[in-house]
Image: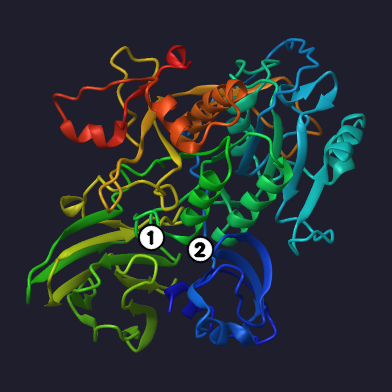
Amino acid sequence: MDPRLKVILYGNPDEELSLLMRLEKEKDYPDHCKIISEFGEIVSIQTQRRYLCSIYNSKKVKSLKAPSVIPANDDVEPNPETRVLDKKNEVLSNTVSNVVFGIIDFGFDFSHPDFINNGKTRFEKIWVQSDRYDGNEFGYGRIISQAQINEALLDEFPFKKLGYHPGKSDLFGNGTHGTHVLGIACGNGAVAPKSFAPNASIIAVDMGTNYVNGSNLSLGDSVKGCDGLYFITKQAGERPLVINMSLGGHGDHHFGLTLFEQVIDYIVTHRKGTAIVQSTGNYHQANAHTYGDIKLNQKVKIPWMFKKHDRTPNEMEIWYDGDDILSVNIYDDNQKILLSSTPFKDELIVKDDDEVGICLHRCKEPNTGKNQINILVNGKLNSKFWTIELIGRTVNNGRYHCYIERDDGGQSIFLPAIVNKTHTTNSICNSKYSIVVGAYNQNDDAKPILSFSSSGPTADGRMKPELVAPGFKIKSSCSSSSRENRAANKLTSKSGSSMAAPYVASLVMKILEKEPNLDIISIRKKLFSACDTASFKDNKLEIFRAGHGYINPNKIT
């Protein structure tokens, strides 16, 4: 069973759970499932906890997954530069692009001039997933219509009128992630620099926000993400569509076979004129990945370092070949053994007679065929570091990958001496047909890839990211802060792969405006052929962060 599924197995039997499910046969569902969104063999469902085990054990089910948290690939600018322009440019255009732009993020300032043409909003709909339920087909959140937004724009207090404030968690006025990304992808030039898709209609999914330790973090998860993709594609109808997602954490297997990633591939291969663009992540220097090869009976020690006084949960994932068997010993900072595990047995981690965590060990995860070890540590931890010792019990392959999951409230790390910076792409951007973008410094003639921009390849050796785009101090639309009643003519600058991905998304929209029926293979080929190749004589590993090279908009045909 999926480790995250085990965590939610016990509780109120009447509680409704949201899950992702891969069927053995399309349209052949087990009992007690309410189907919410559907992508061939993969569906999101709602069910009561009492039915979880029977669904999991059904012969109709190939894989069942609990929701996994998907944080935003937040910007890495510690103090964004925000400024208000004296006046905005007048945007008067009756032209509407034939291409729709979809975005899954958080904090969309519909009152910002960059998303208004002739006094009317360019948003077709905004689904606020964390809002009160309005009776929609998904069973949660509120869907705001274009008419409701236009009515709110006429009011002196549009956010209050609509009941949606994009910057409710933006206490310092730095601007929300979603508005900044949106300005890069399809801003009309009223305030921020004009994008390559200034007339595209917008369909947005706001996954919700939370203010934690000085950062705006998305509270979305894999189930809500899949529902968001379903909502956008359904609303777009048969029109060409480009979706941007700057989301993802450190963990999972990086084979591109999570159910979320399989949904991405299903959408772009079953729908012409469709692309999904993702940021590679800002995790190159996160010290959250290591890998190696273990031999029979060999013991490999992996030091896991914690922040002082950390009271947040911590998680490590270890993925290894399905034909191998590893066991795990866990030692505290005094080299006292906390756990000596038995392969494929779930066991509590105990320190000083107190339960401080659990080690979950799964044989042959159904989507990858890999074995999976999850070490979950609760907030009772009072250690500087642990040592995770892997022991090779049966070894035919020997390769293992270890990831420490992202934790913005108290990130733990591997000892820097054992860290490996490749294979650090975000957890949901490794699918076969998504377009994944890294970031470089466009203000430097040498065009260095930014230090934080994550590195490929995927765990099965494919190129991700596939190209790089400008991502340093990018000026774009700034949303209203929590203290403001509507948008001013504000700009803010942010750095990150989240700023590079929407730049490429804007170019993909430009491609589809001319050739709306291109399939994803042709879209990718056209885009990658418009890259200037990169040469890294001093550090050949940089190619794993550059892919096909630097996107050149002048080469787009």
Is 169 placed above or below 110 here? below
Tell me which numbered mark, 1 or 2, is placed earlier along the sequence. Answer: 2
Quadrant (top left, top right, bottom left, bottom right) of the N terminus? bottom left
Label 2: how many Cα within 10 Å (few below 14, some 14–19, many 20+):
many
Q: Residue at x 88, y 40 (%)?
A: 148
Is 437 placed above or below 407 here? above
Question: What number is the disc on residue 337?
Answer: none
Residue 241 image position (x, y, % from top left): 62, 36
Question: What number is the disc on residue 252?
Answer: 1
Image-quadrant location for residue 105 = top right
Task: Give how far apart the Cα atoms at labels 1 and 2 are.
Answer: 10 Å
Q: Nearer the viewer, residue 107 or 460?
A: 460
Q: Does any portion of residue 140 appear in the rendered image?
A: yes
Is 456 placed above or below 413 here? above
Residue 5 image position (x, y, % from top left): 49, 76
The amino acid type of the residue labelled 1 equals: Asp
Q: Nearer the viewer, residue 393 or 261?
A: 261
Label 1: how many Cα within 10 Å (few below 14, some 14–19, many 20+):
many
Image-quadrant location for residue 188 = top right
Q: Does any portion of residue 219 appear in the rendered image?
A: no
Q: Nearer the viewer, residue 250 or 257?
A: 257
The amino acid type of the residue labelled 2 equals: Ser
Q: CB under 8 Å between callouts 1 and 2? A: yes
Q: Classify residue 527 as left or right of residue 215.
A: left
Residue 445 image position (x, y, % from top left): 31, 12
Is 62 placed above or below 539 here? below
Q: Residue at x 68, y 22 (%)?
A: 490
Question: What number is the disc on residue 68?
Answer: 2
The secondary structure type at the circle numbered 2 is loop
Q: Nearer the viewer, residue 420 or 79?
A: 420
